[in-house]
Amino acid sequence: MPDLIKKITLHDIHESLGAKMIPFAGFYMPVRYHSDIAEHQAVRQNVGVFDVSHMGEFFIKGSNALELIQKVSSNDASTLSIGQAQYSCLPNETGGIVDDLLVYKLDEASYMLVVNASNITKDWEWIQKHNTMGAILEDGSDDYSLFAVQGPRATEVLQPLTSIPLADLPFYHFQTGQFAGAADVILSATGYTGAGGFELYVKNKDAHKVWKAIFESGKHLGIQPIGLGARDTLRLEMGYCLYGNDITEETSPIEAGLGWITKFTKDFINHEALKKQKLEGVKRKLVGFILLEKGIPRSGYTIVNSEGDPVGIVTSGSLSPSMGIGIGMGYIDTAYSKPGTQIGIEVRKKCLKATIKKFPLLTK
C-alpha cells in the first residue's frame, strides 16, 4: 500500500538536524529536535524557526472574491486594506466551526486564505460548494513552504536579508518582496507564539535557499529550529485555539470566545443562529486555567466545581515551560467561567485545585 503521508519540501533537512519526524495532519512533521522545553524557551527569550509548510494556502481572485469570503467567513473582510491580514473562521451550518484561518488581502480583487493542514481538503470543498458567485479559486497548498521565525530577536535575524523595513510592519500586516535572493516572498507580521516575529510564505523552489539564509543570518544569535511540541506549549500559554482540540465542528465561535471575529455587520453562513447565541448567551464557554498544585492537565480530563460536580472538560493542557506550572483550556458551564473561580481538574485518581484565569495564561 502506498504511503499516503506527505513530506514537506525540507523533510531531509529536518532529519539531518536530528528532528523526530511524526505523522501530523497528513504530513511528516518535526515534533522536536532536542527538547520541547529548551525549544520553547529559545522562542520566548531569543529566536527560533518553525517549518509549518503543511499549512494550506488558497487564493481567491476576481470581482466576486470578497463576496465569497464574506459569505463563508465570520469576520468582516471588507475592512481589510491591501497588505493587511485578519484572523477569522469558517462557520458551519449547525453552529460549529469548519476551520479557523487567516485572510490576506493581496490586491483589490485578490486574497490568500491560510488554513489548517488537517482541513485542506474539507475547507476547499466547503468554499467551492458556496462559490455560487463565480469567484476564481486556486489551491496553492502544494506550491508553498511556510517558515515562522518567532521570538524577540526575529527582526534582527531577518532584516539583513530584505529591504522591507520589518520594524515598521504593524502586527497583522504584510509585504511581498525580495528575501534572501528569492522573489515574491510574503513577509507577514503574524505568528502563533505570542513571542513576536514573522511568517514567510516562500515558493518551494526557493525553500532551501531561504531556510539556509535565515540560519546563516541568525547563527551568531544562536538561532534554533523549533518543533511542533514547543509550538503547542507556546500557543497554549497565550490562549490561542488549536483546531481539533479547542474549536471543532461542534463548538461555536461564541462559546469559544471568538465573538471578536464574528461580525454581524454582514450576512454569512449561519449568522442568525450565532447572533442569537451572542444576544441570549451560551451555556458553556472556553476558558483558561492554571493549576494551584503540581500536575499536568490533559485533553479529555474532567473539570469539577468546588463541590466535586462535573462542570466541564479540558480541551488542551500541558506544563507551562515559562511558568513551571500546569495550565490548560477547556469548556465549562458559564456559571463557573468567571476569572478567579476555583475549580478542580481530575487528573487520574486525584482532583487537583485550579483557578480560572483570563487569557493570556502567561504572566510576564
Image (cartoon, rainbow, N blue to C red):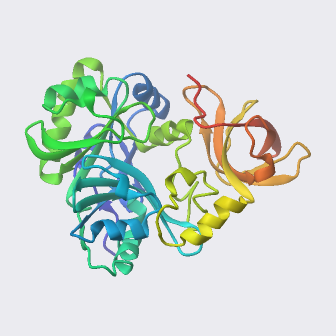
Query: Residue extending furthest top?
Result: 220
Q: State whether residue 361 is above or below residue 346.
A: above
Place of residue 97 in the rendered image (x, y in percent of width and height, measured from the top left): 53, 65
Q: Residue at horizontal 42%, vertical 60%?
A: 25
Q: Position of residue 90 (x, y in %)?
A: 46, 65
Q: Is residue 100 left or right of residue 78?
A: right
Where, quadrant-wise, is the C terminus in this rendering? top right
Q: Residue at x 27, y 27 (%)?
A: 167
At horizontal 75% and vertical 36% (from top left) the residue drawn is 355
Q: Nearer the viewer, residue 72 or 146?
A: 72
| Residue 69 on image: x %, y % | 36, 66
Q: Quadrant of residue 126?
A: bottom left
Q: How many marks?
A: 0
Say above or below: 90 vs 106: below
* Closer to the camera in the image, 133 or 235: 133
Residue 115: tell me if it is visible: no
135 up-or-down from 259: above or below: below
> Quadrant of the image for the N terminus?
bottom left
Q: Which quarter of the picture shows residue 106?
A: bottom left
- Residue 39 percent coordinates (x, y): 42, 31
* Residue nearest the viewer, comparing 88 with 121: 88
Q: Most extreme residue toward the front, as rendered? A: 265
* Quadrant of the rendered image containing residue 256: bottom right
| Relative side of 279 to 189, left or right | right
Relative side of 128 to 181, left or right = right
Q: Say whether residue 97 is visible.
A: yes
Q: Is residue 190 above or below residue 46?
A: below
